[in-house]
Image (cartoon, coloured by chain):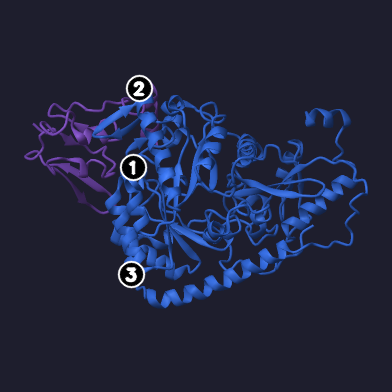
Chain colours: A blue, B purple
């Protein structure tokens, strides 16, 4: 049972992103890290599940060139309606990127992290990438700098990265076996030649592993991203997780393949299946024995701005930035105040969580608890850690697994909202089918309100809708629902089944 | 003899720094950079590299052509997507 941890305090950023308690409640994935690493990452929205509700990040799209081809990428990257890595609306020069970063940092004081993530490979554009970092480390020393890369040029860039005080690097590593690599990377550009197939993949893998070792040996933090491609590298990623951990990566982020035909990627056009939410979760669980896993990644665009899960890029287009006057010295004072307030709040939360909990109603340790099974519950929320979103307006659902004593956050399931606009529920039928598919494995859905029509269909699909816990804290509500179902005998483990499940 | 960049170029800048003759330049236009090969400077990398560097790194099939208009990276040669599926994609795009 959780203490009601200052749950009335809204996140300083207001809405957006996902629920405040949504991800912070699972045992902190970073808690096993040595203190000096944890202190570096615990305020980073992309690394800390807790921090991502408070601190924001932005990406600047200064790096258009790439030196490899991935089968999940289409280099026609300019698209305003897609949200996925490798996509941007506006390419920028380093000067423009610096101006945008300062403008965003002044307007959104919670913005602590500036990343360069594309739309190509940042290290295949070393001049543009490092010029941006150089200017920002001079002009905005209170912003953390990050970069992500496919790793091909990484060994050549490690010295330069260390010089700019970049202490976080993300490498996308999808395989350590060139035969598998050849199915993911059709070619690389290496020493003035396009090199195809297994030969190219072998070079890429060697460079990635070498770069990883060079970075960790210098104390630069490395997170590894992997794209889960069913039938290609899904089983193999368990081995990848072991190897990158052994080489010192501190976090592994297994992300689902995005392969839609209209994106024009090889996998999209060839009909390569994406993993289902349950397949992704099973693989993340399998890998987590070896490695800290990240479960709150939203696979941002290469020009995203704001909290994870939100994008305020439209407020900071080039023409709008041109008209903004930024006094960064003044902004920095304001930013420091905001950061201090957030840090104080986070420290309080951590202290409360670490404190021993007393619950007078809790059964004594030796009292027999009837065996009940774990279930998954989906939540519609706008943020703030409470159930405050209508079913029909939700763009995503947070999924929790809850058992007799504990619960954990499993991840988010994106969907098209059932009600697309104010009055158009016209496509509701097919949209609802998609939502139900995305909720595979979920047995209960909690929303602040659910309409009559989707209610019946959800029930038919084996998902019990429930609107009785509107505005309640998520953790209290899922516990109440679970206890009620357990008391009604709905969660008993059938004896024959429990033996089978244990096997 | 000179290579040419056609309008399917997505402006990714990958070719520009590789040119041994500095023949490639970006013409910054609102929204999208456009690349141009100066025919007086382009040597198709003869004497510098075995293969023309711009075409070796270019990720877009058909974006770089020779003096006869032949693509150095024909359709399907970089992505491995079968031609009939590319054709279907293009038809779908035209209908939009």
Same chain for labels 2 and 3? Say yes or no: no
Read off the residue under disc 3: A323
Picture disc at residue A153: 1
Q: Nearer the viewer, mark 1 or mark 3?
A: 1
Please indicate whether residue A84 sits to the left or right of residue A96 in the image. right
Q: CA distance from mark 1 to mark 3?
A: 37 Å
Q: Residues within 10 Å of mark 3 (few under 14, many from 20)?
A: few
Q: Nearer the viewer, residue A83 or A48?
A: A48
Question: Nearest the camera: B93 or A231?
Answer: A231
**Which residue ends up furthest to the right in the rendered image?**
A367
Q: Chain of mark 3?
A: A
Q: Which residue is mark 2?
A: B83
| Subunit bearing disc 2 | B
Instruction: Label 2, secondary structure: give it.
Output: helix
Both marks 1 and 3 on one chain: yes
Residue occupying the point 85% across, 36% down: A493
Q: Relative to A370, does residue A71 appear above or below in the rendering?
A: above
Q: Looking at the picture, does residue A190 appear above or below residue B12?
A: above
Residue A93 is drawn in which quadrant? bottom left
**Which comes sooner in the sequence, label 1 or label 3?**
1
Q: B6 or A154, which is in the foreground? A: A154
The Cα atoms of the two marked residues, 2 and 3, are separated by: 47 Å
Q: Quadrant of residue B53?
A: top left
Q: Chain of mark 1?
A: A
Residue appearing at x 53%, y 73% in the figure: A338
Compute the Cα span from label 2 to label 1. 32 Å
């Amino acid at each position: 049972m959780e203490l009601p941890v200052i749950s009335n305090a809204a996140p300083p950023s207001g809405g957006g992103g996902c629920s405040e308690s949504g991800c912070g409640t699972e045992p902190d994935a970073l808690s096993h890290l040595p203190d000096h690493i944890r202190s570096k990452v615990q305020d980073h929205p992309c690394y800390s599940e807790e921090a991502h509700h408070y601190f924001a990040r932005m990406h600047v799209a200064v790096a258009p060139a790439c030196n490899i081809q991935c089968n999940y990428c289409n280099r026609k990257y300019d698209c305003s309606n897609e949200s996925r890595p490798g996509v941007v609306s506006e390419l920028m020069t380093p000067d423009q990127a610096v101006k945008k970063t300062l403008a965003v940092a002044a307007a959104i004081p919670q913005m602590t992290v500036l990343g360069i993530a594309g739309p190509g490979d940042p290290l295949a554009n070393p001049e543009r990438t490092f010029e941006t970092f150089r200017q920002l480390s001079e002009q905005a020393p209170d912003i953390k700098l990050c970069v992500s890369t496919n790793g091909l040029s990484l060994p050549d860039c490690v010295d330069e990265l260390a010089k700019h005080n970049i202490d976080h690097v993300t490498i996308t590593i999808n395989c350590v076996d060139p035969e598998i690599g050849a199915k993911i990377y059709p070619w690389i550009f290496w020493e003035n030649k396009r090199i195809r197939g297994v030969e190219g993949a072998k070079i890429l893998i060697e460079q990635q592993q070498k770069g990883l070792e060079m970075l960790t040996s210098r104390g630069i933090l490395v997170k590894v991203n992997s794209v889960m491609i069913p039938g290609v590298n899904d089983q193999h990623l368990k081995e990848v997780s072991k190897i990158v951990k052994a080489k010192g990566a501190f976090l592994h982020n297994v992300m689902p393949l995005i392969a839609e035909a209209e994106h024009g990627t090889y996998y999209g056009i060839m009909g390569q299946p994406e993993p289902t939410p349950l397949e992704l979760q099973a693989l993340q669980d399998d890998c987590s024995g070896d490695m800290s896993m990240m479960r709150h990644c939203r696979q941002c665009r290469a020009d995203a701005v704001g909290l994870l899960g939100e994008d305020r890029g439209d407020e900071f287009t080039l023409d709008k930035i041109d008209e903004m006057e930024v006094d960064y010295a003044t902004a920095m004072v304001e930013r420091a105040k905001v950061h201090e307030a957030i840090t104080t709040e986070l420290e309080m939360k951590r202290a409360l969580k670490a404190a021993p909990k007393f619950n007078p109603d809790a059964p004594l340790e030796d009292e027999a608890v009837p065996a009940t099974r774990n279930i998954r519950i989906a939540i519609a929320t706008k943020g703030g850690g409470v159930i405050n979103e209508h079913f029909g307006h939700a763009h995503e659902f947070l999924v929790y697994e809850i058992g007799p004593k504990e619960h954990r956050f499993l991840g988010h399931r994106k969907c098209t909202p059932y009600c697309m606009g104010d009055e158009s529920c016209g496509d509701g039928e097919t949209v609802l089918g998609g939502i139900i598919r995305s909720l595979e494995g979920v047995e209960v859905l909690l929303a602040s309100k659910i309409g009559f029509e989707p209610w019946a269909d959800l029930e038919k699909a084996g998902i019990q809708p429930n609107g009785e816990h509107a505005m309640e804290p998520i953790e209290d509500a899922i516990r109440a629902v679970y206890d009620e179902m357990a008391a009604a005998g709905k969660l008993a483990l059938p004896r024959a089944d429990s033996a089978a499940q244990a096997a | 003899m000179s290579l040419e960049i056609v309008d399917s170029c997505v402006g990714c800048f990958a070719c520009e720094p590789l040119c041994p003759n500095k023949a490639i330049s970006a013409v910054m236009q609102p929204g999208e950079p456009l690349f141009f090969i100066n025919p007086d400077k382009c040597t198709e990398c003869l004497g510098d590299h075995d293969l023309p560097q711009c075409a070796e790194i270019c990720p877009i099939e058909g974006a770089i052509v020779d003096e006869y208009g032949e693509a150095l990276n024909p359709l399907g040669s970089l992505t491995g997507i079968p031609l009939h599926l590319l054709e279907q994609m293009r038809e779908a795009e035209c209908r939009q």
